[in-house]
Image: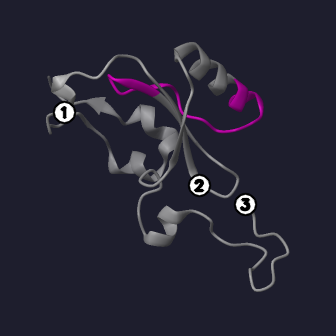
Amino acid sequence: MEARDVPGVPIEYDAGINRGLGLPSGIYHFAFEAGNEAALAQKREELQSKGVQVSGIVDHNWSKSIYFKDPNGISLEYCCLIREFNDNDARMQDRFRISVKALHDPVALPNFATKASQ
């Protein structure tokens, strides 16, 4: 929803929950299931063709994702599972390392995310 012409709501406002909470922009976001890797790549091309700044495809080892922001600055993600979960996935452990800079700019995420040492 968009608060256009609603009494008491300013014309311009910051809709990004992360900025409002003082958090990096990638923390709270909406993720949508792309279905499969081909559909994810197609969604990335579609967004780029519309002029949306979108990340490269990020491999999380169990899923792949792309990241971008809506016009109000809300962080969004399309993702798809690339394998079934296993017992190892249920164990708490370091999965990957990420630069704090990437958290402030999820579109730059592929440049900063690296898998933790195996």
Q: Which residue is drawn at the image coordinates 57% and 26% (left, top)?
A: 34
Q: Earlier in the sequence, mark 1 or mark 2?
A: 2
Q: Which mark is residue 51?
A: none
Dividing the image into 4 quarters, which one contains the N terminus?
bottom right
Q: CA distance from mark 1 to mark 2?
A: 29 Å
Q: Residue 41: horizontal and vertical position, in percent?
A: 59, 19
Report if residue 53 lies within the magenta region.
yes
Find residue 110 and report its image quarter: top left
Q: Which mark is residue 90?
A: 1
Q: Which mark is residue 74?
A: 2
Q: Secondary structure at mark 2?
A: loop
Q: Residue 91: horizontal and vertical position, in percent?
A: 14, 34
Specify few, some or many for label 3: CA neighbours under 10 Å numbering under 14, 14-19, or 20 or more.
few
| Residue nearest the observer in this picture, 71 or 111 | 71
Q: CA distance from mark 2 to mark 3?
A: 13 Å
Q: Which range of residues does the magenta coloring cover?
A: 46-64
Q: Which residue is drawn at the image coordinates 35% and 27% (left, top)?
A: 60
Of the residues shown, which amino acid type is indicated by label 2?
Ile
Q: Which mark is residue 1?
A: 3
In this rendering, the answer to whether 4 lies above or below 37 is: below
Q: Earlier in the sequence, mark 3 or mark 1?
A: 3
Please indicate whether residue 29 sits to the left or right of residue 5 in the image. Answer: left
Asked whether the beta carbons under mark 2 and mark 3 sit within 8 Å of each other, the answer is no
In this rendering, the answer to whether 25 lies above or below 13 is: above
